Image: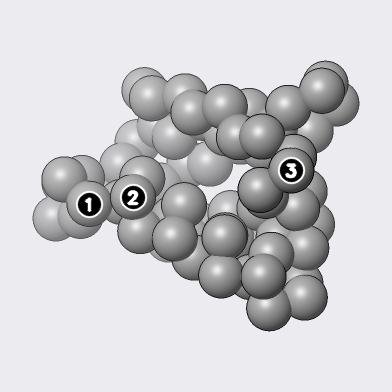
Amino acid sequence: MKTVVLNRKLYGATAVRSAAEDFAELATIVVDSSGQDIAVTFDEIDPDVAEVLVDEFLNFALAATVGGRG
């Protein structure tokens, strides 16, 4: 299990939740946006993408935020 904490100044909660849905086939992803920051927990990560999943997820969520899905 791995947890990352995202700053709301950089990541939109809606974009992060959307990214979690898009990546659902690759891991169990739980988004907690109830606090000041957004906590994202990754569990049961597909071994074929384990090395890059979190980084790719963060890139995807950031692009979605910048693109207006945030």
Q: For the residue labelled by badge 3, is the local secondary structure a helix, a strand or a loop? A: loop
Q: CA distance from mark 2 to mark 1?
A: 6 Å
Q: For the residue labelled by badge 2, is the local secondary structure a helix, a strand or a loop? A: helix
Nearest the camera: 56 or 21? 56
Q: CA distance from mark 2 to mark 3?
A: 18 Å
- For mark 3, what is the residue? 9
Determine the image quadrant of residue 15.
Answer: bottom right
Residue 65 visible in this rendered orientation of the protein: yes
Q: Amino acid at mark 2?
A: Asp
Return the residue found at the far front.
Answer: 9
Mark 3 or 1: in front is 3
Mark 2 or 3: in front is 3
Badge 2: few (under 14), some or many (20 or more) residues near its Cα, within 10 Å?
few
Task: Determine whether, in the image, residue 40 is placed left or right of residue 50.
Answer: right
Q: Amino acid at mark 3?
A: Lys
- The quadrant of the picture occupied by the N terminus is top left
The label shown at residue 55 is: 2
Q: For the residue labelled by badge 1, is the local secondary structure a helix, a strand or a loop? A: loop
Please tell me which of labels 2 and 3 falls first in the chain. Answer: 3
Task: Determine whether, in the image, residue 5 is placed left or right of residue 23.
Answer: right
Q: CA distance from mark 3 to mark 1?
A: 24 Å
- For mark 1, what is the residue? 52
Q: Residue at x 57, y 60 (%)?
A: 62
Q: Position of residue 38 (x, y in %)?
A: 70, 32
Mark 2 touching mark 1, by CB under 8 A? yes
Q: Amino acid at mark 1?
A: Val
Residue 69 against residue 9 in the figure, above or below: below
Residue 9 against residue 40 in the figure, above or below: below
Nearest the camera: 60 or 49? 60
Q: Residue at x 78, y 63 (%)?
A: 70
